[in-house]
Amino acid sequence: MKRKKFLALALVLTLTVSAFTGCGSKSNGSTADKSGTKEDGKVTEENITLTMMYSGVQTENDFETEVLPKLVKEKFPNITLEVTKLPDDQYYTALKTKLASGEAPDIILVQPKNAGSNSVIGLAKAGYLLDLSDMNAIKLAGDSASESFSYDGKVYGIASGATMLGTYYNKDIFAANNLEVPTNWDEFLNVCEVLKNAGIQPIVMGDKDSYVLQFGLYQLAANVVYPKNSSYDDQLGEGETKFTDEGTWDKVLEMYNTLYEKGYIIESSLGLGATQAIQKFVDGEAAMTFDGSFNVNAITAKGAIDFERGYFPLPGNAAGEDVYASVAPGAGPAIYSGTKYPDEVKAILDYWYDGESDLYKAYADSGRVVVTYGYGTDKNNPLFTSFLDLYNEGKAFYWCNQAWPAGVETEMQALFSEMIGGQGTKVTDITNGMQMKFEELYTE
Amino acid sequence: MNEFYDYLQSETEKGDRKLSRIKKKSGGNDISLVMPKRMYFFIVPAIALFLIFWIFPVLQLFYYSITNFNGINYNYDFVGLDNYIRLFKEGTLANSIKNTLVYAIIIVIGSNIIGLAMAMALDVKIKGKTFFRTATFIPALFSAIVVGFIWSYVYMPESGMIATLLNFIGLDGSKFNLLGNYKTALYGISFVDIWKNVGTTMIIYLAGLQTIDTSLLEAGRIDGCSDWQLLRKVKLPLITSTITINVILNVIAGLKAFDYSFIMTNGGPGKSTNTLMFTIYRIAFTDQMMGKASAFSVASFFVIILITIFMLIFLNKKEVDL
């Protein structure tokens, strides 16, 4: 009898303990709107420590972990900024855990729209972010950037520069074959045909890392889907549009598949990794590759032969129509709603993104972002000029997956790989699969 | 002398009285003086840790599997068996189970045959035996990430190591695309797993072979056994327990296959190298659907239990038979 009592006691004890820990982790959501009682906009003079967590790989003289805290200290001597930088996957896990336990850092990195597990919409919906709409930095970043960081009419994050997807090409090969940068889809196909007939592999892609499929597809979608209906993705959620609609994604996938069918994209692409494909381009074994501005260093690295690189938006447009680029506002900082010092954090971010401060200059000079306003716009890599011009003219759209719940693009990649891998998958199967996945993942 | 005897007697009586008192307290049951019941209190910390960090999360898995929890937002809804139904409908579960089983079977068979063969070869007296033993074991020392990266260059189409070798001997290396092909990618990555882990299997077999009494082998030879008979009738029966261990270890490794799908193919092409663990990872961390991933884990839990039961019955029987 007694033994059972003991066991029961032990069980009760442990359950109470676990129940308490359970409560602790769940109570955080309600502390969301707790803000200081100080006057608005006034920065404290007490010595305080703020925390910030970013994702990425730490480099030498790293901007976020070394330069930023130093320059913040210079401007606000009483504020110490502690920055942690984690590799992407670890960052997501750490962020989730910290948010769940109510101990998130004051500044966190968020991605626009629905992108990733740190998407601004996902976090804002859960009440984890502070409304930044009134900040100066938001006004400077421009409407298209703010739009990508909005949820329910309020802005919750600051865009850090812009990142673009485009087509890197070997200028020497183009010149040797008397080719010009194509301005519409037919011209592009012609360029590929000429190169192929000359015995040159037109395009190399590393589809073994299937995310690179997005590089080409999104550029085409920016020309085919969004110019006709700029709120296509928002309407997906309301059910007004569907991936299966005629003349939208079926056309995009069909166009991209043409490049495989005709052998313009290297036949062994499914066995090549992303870095291996870049290496082939750099070694001059192929004339073009679809890639992002984030890989510019790898693309312009010295390979087996020397040649000049160019970069153009893949023209998915019909003759006589305008070319659109796929340019995404970059992931940027947001403020945790549970922060004890909302005004101080806002002051720091306003200073950081004012377009002219020492901090902004250091940020622009770090070379990791392509700045869209203020100091440093003249120093951007000339490869990006045509893209930024389109961006400023409003002829650019964000990357499709930024507006989709994470997972739709993986389904698209898997099904598209099946199609090019000869598994009998058809374009309609892909659009159906994407629509099903979207409906499964989308939560209002 | 008498005084001492009296003293002893009284002490014994005292002890008896005490014992009967204790007995009365404990309701007349026999109690152990070595392990009194209050000792059970000391296992509370261990039990607590075990329950909080192990049992409780496992039970939560069952709970989350009927919600649409996304890992961030605690305002989730209960969706009943929707997660399970969807997994069956999509064919994700069937595909992952199939891939995992194929993977496990390949590495169990491959690893054990190659491992046993190598162990036999290294069990004989040859020059440089230690060097060869070390060499076969070295791959097991590398981390899976490193091995995965190296092998993706070995397999690289056109300019990888195998493609270059094929070109060198006059074959068409440009057609070699193991990881890019739906039919071969799974075999490609399971071979890498065998390459990496065969050293461990070999070492265990070697240890097993060395426990065999040489007098038995000599007796066999005198009775006129051929080498094959010696292997089949003497050596193998004597190392059955080693075989069991190796098969079980390889089945475990096969069922939790994740590393090479993740590093070398990212589950692709398409979904042809999606294993159980990889799919759980993908659903949980790419699709951000902790609820569905939990449902998938519960399903895999039952699959693995079934396989384990089957294995236990089968292997126990075999061990007795041999």
Image (cartoon, coloured by chain):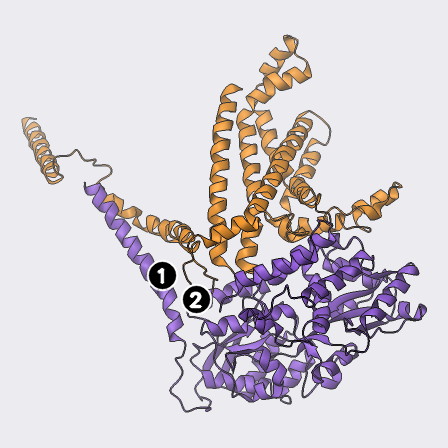
Residue A436 placement: quadrant = bottom right
**Total label count?**
2
Residue type at numbered disc 2: Ala
Residue type at numbered disc 1: Gly
For label 2, the SS is: helix
Q: Position of residue A347 (x, y in %)?
A: 52, 87
Residue at (45%, 84%) from the top-left corner? A47
Q: Is residue A87 or residue B1 the one in the foreground?
A: A87
> In the picture provided, is B209 more to the left or to the right than A27?
right
Residue at (47%, 73%) from the top-left corner? A125
Residue assigned mark 1: A22
Query: Chain drawn purple, letter?
Result: A
Q: Which mark is residue A250?
A: none
For label 1, the SS is: helix
> In the picture provided, is B151 more to the left or to the right than A133?
right
Residue assigned mark 2: A100
Q: Position of residue A437 (x, y in %)?
A: 57, 60
Q: Position of residue A371 (x, y in %)?
A: 68, 81
Q: Is residue A116 or residue B125 the one in the foreground?
A: A116
- State the CA–CA distance, disc 2 to disc 1: 11 Å
Task: Name chain B's colour.
Answer: orange
Name which of mark 2 and mark 1 comes first in the sequence: 1
Mark 2 neighbour class, 10 Å CA radius: few under 14, some 14 to 19, many 20 or more: many
Residue at (70%, 31%) from the top-left corner? B129
Residue A97 visible in rendering: yes
Q: Position of residue A252 (x, y in %)?
A: 72, 65
